Image (cartoon, rainbow, N blue to C red):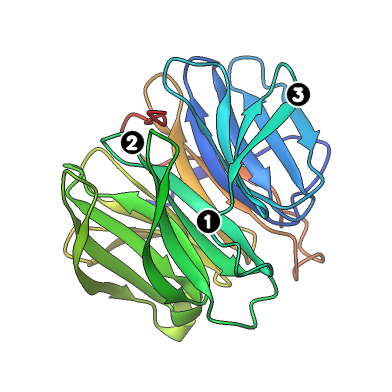
Amino acid sequence: MEAQFRVVARAERDRLGEGPVWVPERGRLFWVDIEAPALRWLDLASGETGTRPFPEPIGWIIPRAGRRDFVIGLKSGFAVFDLEADQVTPIGNPEPDYPDNRLNDAKVDYAGRIWAGSMHQAETAISGALHRLDPDLTWQRMDGDYGVANGPTFSHDGRILYHSDSAARTVFAFDLAADGTLTGKREFLRFPEAWGWPDGMTTDAEGCLWIAHWGAGRISRVDPEGRLVRAISLPATNITSCAFAGPGLDRLFVTSASRGAEHEPSAGALFELDVGVAGLPPRAFGG
């Protein structure tokens, strides 16, 4: 049965919507428009939306455990963002030798560490990498040679990290140790050309991955063995990411991009879907 969806009303379409994250303490879903650039949010109870412009590309936003501020990924690197004070405090740039790169997509693991990818902003160089930001605000480069590093998510038990190179149409899997080391990099899923390119991902309560398809107008549910379980079409060619939200974690929100698809009325919209399964509880950064 096809999932029911609705377009979440707001005043503007995202040029490159990405990185949705549910913050239950605030009752809000946050996401970014990387190329506006802007931070956006939706209050799930009232339906009210908000926007905060940024002077440089912003790839993601993640809440901090026990605090009111966030960690964000900017073109210039990691930073702390206080929404109420409207203040940005830099942490550091993990790629000072790659001035044309920017941070792109991130998630938090079970130990409270942020895993963040990077990419060449013009997408003309294979200079992306996967970085780990630890709670003590130090970071390490964990893997490299990505065209477009994208969509990290984790297995139900947290022992596998999934990470994509969108340019290579490939989702990789790594064994993730308790100390944050990665081993056993392997191909988990390769997209055929008709599927477009793998973008953002999330994991549901049954351990399946939901993957956004850039260029193919759909999201897919894939089981832990890499087998396609379900595909849901949406009225926007460039689907970018997804996240479960709401008190029951049973509302799937999907971001999209109008870039390159300005003629599509729903391109750049935020969609809400009822897919009949719940997500995993969101995690906050431990630092």
Q: Position of residue 66 (x, y in %)?
A: 43, 15
Mark number displayed over residue 279: 2
The residue labelled by disc 1 is 94
Which one is closest to the eye, mark 2 or mark 3?
3
In the rendered structure, which amino acid carries the disc numbered 1? Pro
Disc 3 residue type?
A: Asp
Q: CA distance from mark 2 to mark 1?
A: 31 Å
- For mark 2, give the secondary structure: loop
The front one of 185 and 15 is: 185
Q: Residue at x 37, y 40 (%)?
A: 134
172 left or right, relative to 243: left
Q: Is residue 78 above or below residue 75?
A: above
Q: Residue 212: percent from the left, percent from the top?
A: 48, 59
Q: Identify the mark at residue 234; answer none if there is no mark.
A: none
Which x, y percent locates residue 188?
25, 70
Label 1 CA crowd tier, 10 Å (few <14, some 14–19, many 20+): many
Please state which of residues 210 and 186 is positioned toward the viewer in this rendering. Answer: 186
Whichever of callouts 2 and 3 sits on the residue coming sooner in the sequence is 3
SS at mark 1? loop
Q: Quadrant of residue 50?
A: top right
Quadrant location, the C terminus: top left
The residue under the point 29% across, 73% down is: 189
Horizontal side, residue 191 vs residue 101: left or right: left
Q: Which residue is mark 3?
A: 86
